[in-house]
Amino acid sequence: MLIVPQRVQSRAVTSSSPPRAGVLALQGAYQAHARVLSALGCEVVEVQRPAQLEGLRLLCMPGGESTTMSLLLSSSGLREPLRQAIAAGLPVLATCAGAILLAQRLEGDSGSLKVEPLGLLDLTVDRNAYGRQNESFEAGLEIDWTGLPGSSAGGTQLFHAVFIRAPRFQLPGAQVRVLASFQPAGAAAAEPVLVRQGNIIAAAFHPELSGDDRIHRAALGLRPADF
Amino acid sequence: MNEASVNGSGPVSGSFAVKIGLAEMLRNGVIMDVTNPEQAVIAEQAGAVAVMALERVPADIRAQGGIARMSDPAMIREIMGAVSIPVMAKCRIGHFVEAQILEAIGVDFIDESEVLTPADETNHVWKHDFKAPFVCGCRDLGEALRRIGEGAAMLRTKGEAGTGNIVEAVRHMRTVQNGIKRLGTLGREELMREARDLGAPFDLVQWVAEHGKLPVPNFAAGGVATPADAALMMQLGAETVFVGSGIFKSEDPAPRARAVVQAVLNFKDPKALADISAGLGEPMRGKDIASMPQEERMAARGW
């Protein structure tokens, strides 16, 4: 199974048809991402099989249960094609469990079923480290839009972020740019909650639930040629 | 949404957006009833998105009779310690102190459930008072909107729990969907009367008429026993499936649990469903509901 980034790019640049964006549709809040992408004029593909990765301008990896998604990545045969496609430059917006699936290092994976991450994002992700649902929260975030495509469109308005049993991002590698941080109660310092590494944007929170499409718009501006 | 309270100030927890957020994360999955850590582990390893911790599955509550109450907090904590996925637990209808206890334990979702013996035949819990999100059962649109009005962040069909019989869950899902479709056909001037007939809050009736859907996710529950049952409920519009007695009252729970998870992923693919359904052993025996006396029906509890 070959995913050729050049084809992705040529389709995006030369075709007048709407950009094709995928949502990883194994489990979780993928319809929420699909709604945002549709409203932005995308043709949305629910990705459940390797062939559906072809011709995508962007793939959203949604929130949900990372254990379930990791298991279904393997049973659906998507795991290796997805890893190869992202490694070859497929632009990705990963939120919450999606970010867990991309991580190179996992902490706090305390259940009876372990997540097998794809190991593409140079970050330590601590699962459910903000706590259980009682500790889920909303907060306004300042985002450094200069680290994203179309930076001028971001503006200065805080981003209303919803964190649900969220993972904590730690020890970002040299290639990882931190775009927003948040200081949890009891933490010594602010920690990354929105990062970018080349073709990957990863959020510990859920931009698809905010009614604010700025992060999705920026993600649609990612090009395989940019990195 | 608490936009005003968020911008420019500290974090806010327990808001309605945060409650619905977890319901959204549980979509397109399977939530399994479990009665001990061993079953919770089987559920997690099969790919469940959450477990419901309870002392007796509905089929046993039905068989054994007596008063069914909130489970022992020690047992719920053990299950919370055994798995990393969200853990839900049930309180009796109207029993807000059981709900307070479940919130104090830190369960991720509280099910105000007709499967337990109701504590209040007039009032449900005022769920807005809680940081923990609630799921409630419904049989029709009016009941769904009353529960949302009280603060439920997720709904499920009541079905008829512990029967292994999908007929009531199908009825309830279709009735809710038809109620939503009907609202879409009405003029604005007709909505007040519809709200009166549904016995539902007027603002929520207006919201559903405008958006063509419920403001919170609606899951299927009550009588799911096979992968085909789960896929049926998904095709009828359920956003996730609860399986109560159907897994651990079957002959061979682990393969059945895995099969139901696969069936929800492949719910539109009959060929895949054929493979998934093959060789699973006996499902739970089940019960005919038509011949069941009215007082044995759990769905009639609550209003």
Image (spheres, coloured by chain):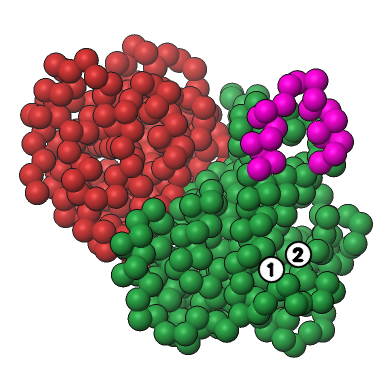
Chain colours: A red, B green
The magenta span reads B178-198
Give the residue number, with chain letter if any, for mark 1.
B160
Parent chain of label 1 = B
Residue A14 visible in the snapshot: yes
Give the residue number, with chain letter if any, for mark 2.
B299
* Residue B40 x, y percent position in the rendering: 50, 75
Q: Residues within 10 Å of mark 2 (few under 14, many from 20)?
A: many
The residue that appears at 79% across and 84% down in the rendered structure is B65
Residue B12 visible in the snapshot: no
Along the horizontal axis of the image, is B204 left or right of B96?
left
* Mark closer to the chain start, 2 or 1: 1
Parent chain of label 2 = B
Q: Amino acid at mark 1?
A: Glu
The residue that appears at 59% across and 46% down in the rendered structure is B217
- Which is more toward the observer, A190 or A1? A1
The residue that appears at 8% across and 44% down in the rendered structure is A2
Classify mark 1: helix, strand or loop: loop
* Residue B163 x, y percent position in the rendering: 65, 76
* Residue B58 x, y percent position in the rendering: 67, 76
- Which is more toward the observer, A66 or B105? A66
Q: Amino acid at mark 2?
A: Ala
Magenta stretch prevailing secondary structure: helix
Classify mark 2: helix, strand or loop: helix
Along the horizontal axis of the image, is B2 left or right of A6?
right
The residue that appears at 66% across and 43% down in the rendered structure is B178
Tags 2 and 1 in contact by the CB under 8 Å rule?
Answer: yes
Q: How many marks?
A: 2
Q: Residue furthest front?
A: B290
Q: Residue furthest top?
A: A152
Q: Quadrant of the N terminus of chain B?
A: top right
Along the horizontal axis of the image, is B92 left or right of A57?
right
**Residue B128 sits in quarter:** top right
